[in-house]
Amino acid sequence: MFLLAAEGGESTHNPILPIWQEIVVGGIAFAVLCFVLMKFVFPRMEQTFQARVDAIEGGIKRAEAAQAEANQLLEQYRAQLAEARTDAAKIRDDARADAEGIRQDVLAKAREESDRIIAAGKEQLAAERATIVRELRAEVGTIAVDLASKIVGESLADEARRKGTVDRFLSGLESAGTR
Amino acid sequence: MFGQANVLAQGEAAFPPSVEDFYLPSILPWGAENSYWFTKITAMVWLAVGILAIYFLVSYRKPQLVPTKKQWIAESIYGFVRNNIAVDMIGHAGVRFAPYFTTLFCFIVLTNFFAIVPGFQISPNSHIAFPAVLAAISYVMFIWVGIRHHGFGKFFKNSLIPPAPWYILPLLIPIEFFSNFLVRPFSLAVRLFANMFAGHMLLLVFTLGGFAMLNASAWFAPVSLLSWVMTVALTFLEFLVIVLQAYVFTVLTASYVQGALAEEH
């Protein structure tokens, strides 16, 4: 300012020398702007950016956690289902085995019973037959002896002889019958 | 604008334009020649501060995770300086400087932008006082940051003593001192100031030149027209310079801070 003025040019201002009033005004104005923007605006922007990052990363994390939980549950259900299936199969097999056992038991018992009944019948039959045979033998002997006594007119007192005669006769009859 | 208005009102184009065209009469008190507290220039500075503060406060009043269009634009401005200047130059530690760089960038862009807004058409940055204030802040900031980070001794050792053989150091240390601590603030301020000063001067030359030729002779009318077309073209060029200079100022400040924080020379 002073230099050019001293040179006597028509300019009274030197553009390269700052005007101190403008320095003061510029300093204050810029300080005010810095204060407002750096205190109330840009830190909040930084916070918003951070919140946005958190929200996105948190969302991803939550989704991953949910996915993992779902997978775990699925595995659990599958395991339970498989377990239930094997249980059911086992129960069915058991039931089948039981039924088979019961059937076998019943059959065996029935067979046993029928065998027992048949055996008892046979035994009874044999016993009755034996009794009848014995009674018939005695009766036939007596009748035959009586008949012979009457015919022959003589008493066959000798029992041993008589018995032997009758037995021989009956044996002859039986052998003739079987032949 | 006042200069041009005066010129037109007086009916004579003061051609060529001079440095005095940058120093407009005071608004309060009205018309005073050497009163600088309240001039068109300082009014524009306050206006820029007001516009920026209100714009950011309003568009960021209720920030949401999913931004509205207004919020998104404000965020993009901050995000641009934060990611493309602060983080790119300084690395992750640059995030804490991003608020200041963004303020600086917005302030320079807007005050520069007044250079081509009809009705304003002069940038406060064509007065060296304002770039000087900003450069001084950058200067103090990088030295302060360096001392805070390294401690006083190590910072100046890093800045002044390059890794070189000892016998060349007596030559290098003054050069380093000169370039790092004397030239830096000066070059920052003058680069911005000179660009805006020259831009305004260019527009004045072509605008007033058109009038001067028209006044000289009606035969020069086509040339006057060409001159004014040039003014329009140069206005577009000015727009480029406006944005570029704001970007350069911010990037250089970031680069100085990065240098101050660097571990090696």
Image (cartoon, coloured by chain):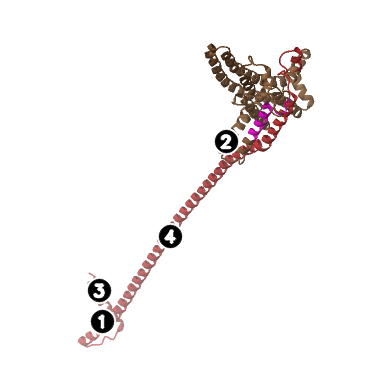
Chain colours: A red, B brown
**Label 4 environment density (alpha carbons within 10 Å; few <14, some 14–19, many ≥20):** few
Q: What residue type is labelled 4?
A: Ala
The residue lying at 74 percent from left, 12 percent from top is A8
- Image coordinates of residue B32 in percent, x first then y, are 72, 25
Q: Nearer the viewer, mark 1 or mark 4?
A: 4
Mark 2, Cα crowd under 10 Å, few <14 / some 14-19 / many 20+, is some
Cα distance in 3D space between marks 2 and 4: 73 Å
Identify residue for label 1: A140
For label 2, the residue is B72
Q: Is label 2 in contact with label 3 (beta carbons under 8 Å)?
A: no
Give the Cα distance between marks 2 and 3: 132 Å
Examine the residues drawn in magenta and state their main secondary structure: helix
Q: Are marks 1 and 3 on the same chain?
A: yes
Mark nearer the viewer, 2 or 3 = 2
Above or below residue A109? Residue A19 is above
Could you say which disc has been placed on residue A95 in the image? 4
Disc nearest the viewer among 2 and 4: 2
CA gap between label 4 and label 3 equals: 60 Å
Q: Give above or below for A99 relative to A14.
A: below
Residue that carries the numbered disc 3 in the rendered image? A174
- Identified by mark 1, the residue type is Val
